[in-house]
Amino acid sequence: MRSVDESLYAARITVIDRAISLVANQMEVDATLAAEYDKTIKMLEIEQELGATSKELPDAAGLAMMGKVDELRLMEEQNADLRIRFAADDEVAKLIGQI
């Protein structure tokens, strides 16, 4: 599109560039979320091994895991927000395609 007539396709180029940026952001959030899930799983496995004879996790470990859960929830919210923005950009692209 840019090589043919950038001004003619400016709106579509803008939408595509925005979509690419949102997908890149989504991939970063997904990678971070997956890494944090892995870390939390490893923490739980360690605590399970250490506390096999105990019914309760130590307070410090429990608090640390709750903090991680809160971080994961925040990242999931960011992920959802990016998905909404991506869908909105997709709708704009469809409308531009109809013009």
Image (tube, rainbow, N blue to C red):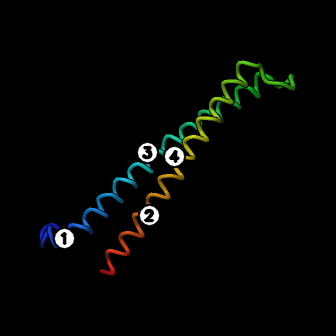
Q: Callout 3 environment at 10 Å: few (<14), some (14 to 19), or many (20+)?
A: few
- In primary-sequence order, the first of circles 2 and 4 is 4
Mark 3 / mark 4, whichever is N-terminal: 3
Q: Nearer the viewer, residue 91 or 30?
A: 91
* Spatial separation of the CA atoms under disc 4 and disc 1: 32 Å
Query: Closer to the N terminus: mark 4 or mark 1?
Result: 1
Please state which amino acid type lies under the numbered disc 3. Answer: Glu
28 shown above or below 7: above
Give the quadrant of the N terminus. bottom left
Quarter-wise, where is residue 86 in the image?
A: bottom left
Q: Is residue 96 left or right of residue 46?
A: left
Q: Position of residue 14 (x, y in %)?
A: 26, 62
Image-based side of 11 in relation to 49, left or right = left
Name the residue carrying label 3.
28
Q: Which residue is mark 4?
A: 78
Checking the image for residue 1, the label placed there is 1
Mark 1 crowd level (few <14, some 14–19, many ≥20, 10 Å Cα) = few
